[in-house]
Image: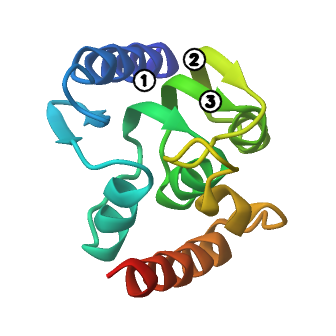
Amino acid sequence: MEDLKQIIEINNDLIKAKENLNNHTIALVKNNVIIVSEKKGISPMMDYIKDGVDLNGFSVADVIVGKAVALLFVKEGIKNVFAKVISKAGLEVLKEYKIYTEYETLTDNIINRKGTDICPMEKTVLEISDPSYAYEKLKETLSLLKNNNG
């Protein structure tokens, strides 16, 4: 009976996360705690990790889920994911870690903002399977991009 109660809570969290995705890029829900952001890409998750936000057990709705953010979800203990768009590599990561996943569109790759190539974050984690190592490499990539564009 306890398992059923837990499943219902998790499903409610995922439903709430989806409902809160409107006008946001990401929505995270656990019980009655709702966290949303309008930042693009992996920035919200990178910020939450850097700031020490405890996301263990949260359900998340995200506009775009590639392998990079999927690895961050794993690192932070996310339990359920809904993606409007998910890459095959992102879906594989979530399946590997047995994270319940729903999505609207499955795509081969996540493309950069200019639409000219694969997203640099995706390129960073192409050969990485360890979530903590992925986080460190993504921090390096973001820092390099910021220094080159800033």
Near mark 3 (Cα within 10 A), the count class, few <14, some 14-19 or many ≥20, is many
The image's mark for residue 22 is none
Location of residue 65 by image quarter: top right
The residue located at (39%, 77%) in the rendering is 149
In the picture of the structure, the residue carrying the numbered disc 1 is 6
Q: Which residue is mark 3?
A: 86
**Residue 14 screen position, x and y as percent:** 38, 21
Say which element carries label 3.
Answer: strand
Q: Quadrant of the C terminus?
A: bottom left
Instruction: Give whichever of 135, 121 is nearer the camera.
Output: 121
Disc 1 residue type?
Gln
x%, y% of residue 92? Answer: 79, 38
Secondary element under disc 1, as helix, strand or loop, is: helix
Q: CB of mark 2 within 8 Å of CB of mark 3?
A: yes
Single out the residue that lies furthest toward the right: 127
Q: CA distance from mark 2 to mark 3?
A: 7 Å
Name the quadrant containing residue 140.
Answer: bottom right
